[in-house]
Amino acid sequence: MNLAHTTVLLWAWGSLQAFEIVEKENIFQRTPCPAFLMFDNAAYLTDMSFELPCPCKPEEVSAVVWYYQKHLGSSHTKVLTDFDGRVLTEAAQVRVGSDMLVRFSIRMFSLLVFRAQPEDSGLYFCGTRKGDYFYAYDVDIQSSEGMVATFKDQGQEPLEDEYHGSLRVFTTFWEWTPCDRCGVRGEQWRIGLCYLQSPDLSPRYRKILPNVVSCGSRAVPRQLRAKASDHNPELLVRSCLMPCEKKKVQEGVMAIFNYVSKVGSRPWLPQVPIQFHQQRLGHGLIISCPGARPEHAVAWDKDHQYLYRTQYLKGVNGSMRVFIDHGNHLHIRFTQLEDRGIYYCWRQGERIAGFRLGVTSPGRYPVSFSDPETRAALGLILIGYMLITVIFISIHLCRCCCYLFRFCPNFSPRLSRPQL
């Protein structure tokens, strides 16, 4: 009886999987590919991860190949595939500044690009191994350098629209993020990217609205793009207040906690995982929130001090030593002894991690060639040694030339013969 039940369950599970695969294949069958290749416009901020779906493909195509071009018709084309339709890449393993060929993945015919950089802007084609394209995107990655922060609590307003004849340059804002903290006053913000409206755009690019594309789109002529180059992305920040959700603590942990409290002093029980780190005095440090992305609502606290973006956002003060960048990373420049403490990280309104920072005074530590300061010191010593060697050889070459051609002046003192 048990064997019969197991057989029926396995058959039902296989039928469900087959139904799921058929449904996914029917999506491609129901979506016809455009007869004339068009480009869908999409804009993102630096360090964001984005997904480009391939909504259509011929029935006989079993694996797609993604291509990248900087400009339409460029002779240099990157092939983004392992010719098996997929490349396994985890976002946690991708570092900032890595090449795009390392930062992409293909899953279910969709292209995923992690930690996008401005140089990733361009045209992305979904096609076959033979180079036949059937869907394309026009991707614009806008840099966060020079991003304008607007604080509504201080009465500030977003940038006004710019007009240059028939050209209109404006900011399109995303939805508000959730409150970055709960139970206390928090902050929420929305990212604004640069867009423009003009009747002189290329008709081959699909627009979100009539004659509206992002400022870095390939549909924008070069002369219009130069006029919109001074319009930077924006960050709109305001205060918020959100209650915390009650969570059930594991019964085993609470039982041990109560027993120890009755026996002796009440122990310190961290509410979130704590990571310990030792930093040398005077060196810089960058702390990242686990699993956070630039579009997430991320907040930082030091012990019981709330580090609000109104005071600690990058660019608010030019002489800031501790600040939060637009990628939600906490920067500590020239670490001081007063920087010691626990730094808590909030993500989407929930405190998820802590970093206990210890600062050690400069002393003897093992020298390693992987240390950038050690490499810099050796480089300076080598340059100084080479400079002294060049000066020494140059002086001796000059003296040799003087004695060889006999025009070197004689500075030795002449002895005068006394007169009798």
Image (cartoon, helix red, strand yellow):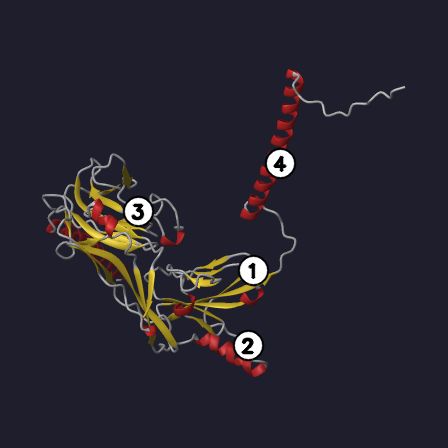
The label nearer to you, 3 versus 1, is 3
> In the rendered structure, which amino acid carries the disc numbered 2?
Pro
Q: Give the spatial CA distance, label 3 vs label 4.
A: 42 Å
Local secondary structure at mark 4: helix
> In the rendered structure, which amino acid carries the disc numbered 1?
Gln
Q: Which labelled disc corresponds to residue 278?
A: 1
Check the image and report above or below for 292 versus 78. below
Most extreme residue toward the bottom is: 262
Classify residue 377 by image quadrant. top right
Q: Which labelled disc corresponds to residue 385?
A: 4
The label nearer to you, 3 versus 2, is 3
| Residue 72 visible to the viewer | yes
Residue 65 point in image, percent of width and height? 24, 41
How many callouts does the rendering have?
4
Q: Do the residues labelled 1 and 4 touch (CB within 8 Å)?
A: no
Residue 248 point in image, percent of width and height? 39, 76
Residue in the image at 81% along x and 23% along y: 415
